[in-house]
Image (tube, rainbow, N blue to C red):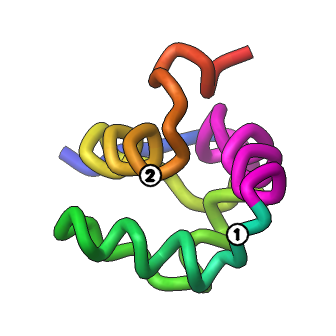
Amino acid sequence: MARIIDSKQKNMIGEKVRELRKERNMSQAELSAKLETLAIYICRGSISRIEDQSRTVTDIELYGLSQVLSTPIEDFFK
């Protein structure tokens, strides 16, 4: 069954991802490269779409973001 999200906002964590990435002086490309070392493949463009909340985030991607940004998963949520 297809997943339907009736909102322009496709994730709840995009703003926090951007905030944490910038706090660590990391570019979107650098974040993408660090995720790749964990075998989590999110291109720079998809990082941008996560941050502007126009792309969904899987649980595995959230785990990777948590590891790379050294932030507990619960801290991604307001």
Place of residue 62 in the rendered image (x, y in percent of width and height, measured from the top left): 40, 41
Name the quarter where the C terminus is drawn: top right
User: Which secondary structure, mark 2?
Assistant: helix
Nearer to me, 73 or 71: 71
The earlier-in-sequence mark between 2 and 1 is: 1
* Residue range of the region highlighted in magenta in the rendering: 7-24
Apparent side of residue 52 relative to residue 68 in the rendered image (left or right): right
Query: Callout 2: few (<14), some (14-19), or many (20+) C-alpha neighbours within 10 Å?
Result: some
* Residue at which label 2 appears: 68
Nearer to me, 33 or 77: 33
User: Which secondary structure, mark 1?
Assistant: loop
* Residue at which label 1 appears: 26
Occupied quadrant, residue 30? bottom right
Q: Are marks 2 and 1 in contact (CB under 8 Å)?
A: no
Q: Amino acid at mark 2?
A: Val
Q: Amino acid at mark 1?
A: Met
